[in-house]
Amino acid sequence: MSRTKDQWWDEINNSREEDDRADEQASLAEARYQSQHAADEVCNFIGDQFYWFAEQLVEADEDIAGKLIAAVDAALKDKHYRALTEITKTSETAGTHLQGHIYGRSFSDLCKVFGAPHWRWTPHIFDENKTDVEWSFKFPDGRIFTVYNWKDGKAYNGDKGLSVDDIKEWNIGGLTSSVAWDVNDLLNIKLGMVTNVKQ
């Protein structure tokens, strides 16, 4: 069966598009190789060689140096964001203790970020507890943290205690102090960049 002129042109254009795609793929592969090679070289630097490299880069092209700084900063923030937001519920809280506080955040704010509390006190006769609600999570790097109120709610103070909806100060538990910073960062990321100052 013979082809029409349009079919011939389609074949030629498809061939050109495939050639263009092949060229793009080859260019991309080369760029990736070059960036990986450069990264490997930089990773081999020790001590003052990093500063020398930075000075050389700024001297050669300040605009490119600025773009590199912005790209590295964005990549670090993205990695930090993922590390903070990809938390998983855990029950492995043995040994955790107070590491810091959350100020000025409501129970509703915490539920927006963490979901419903993993544990919630329910009143029973003679059932006193120091905590009304608690969440417990694990960061991707394995660090455990808990968020809970302490001795200010109805579980501990009865009718004189605060309702969980009125609590604005929360404890952060964990095994390392770094969780306190990261939990507050997580709240700021999820709820908006609002400075957490004691109110």
Image (cartoon, helix red, strand yellow):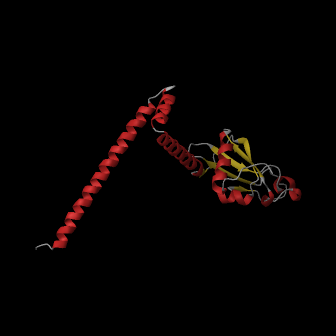
Q: Position of residue 28 (x, y in %)?
A: 34, 48
Q: Which residue sits furthest right?
A: 160
Near-viewer residue (33 or 50): 50
* Residue 114 shows up from this direction: no
Rendered view: 53 above or below 93: above
Q: Quadrant of the rendered structure where residue 92 is? A: top right
Decide which of 132, 49 is in the foreground and name it.
Answer: 49
Q: Is residue 88 left or right of residue 123?
A: left
> 60 left or right of 136?
left
**Which residue is most to the top?**
47
Question: Which part of the image, by quadrant, shows the N terminus?
Answer: bottom left
In this rendering, the count of numbered labels is 0
Q: Is residue 176 above or below residue 5?
A: above
**Residue 65 image offset from top left, x and y in percent:** 49, 40
**Residue 20 in picture, x, y percent from top left:** 28, 56
- 13, 190: nearer the viewer: 13
160 to the left or right of 3? right
Q: Residue at x 24, y 63 (%)?
A: 14
Q: Position of residue 101 (x, y in %)?
A: 74, 46
Question: Residue lying furthest left in this view?
Answer: 1
Q: Is residue 126 visible?
A: yes
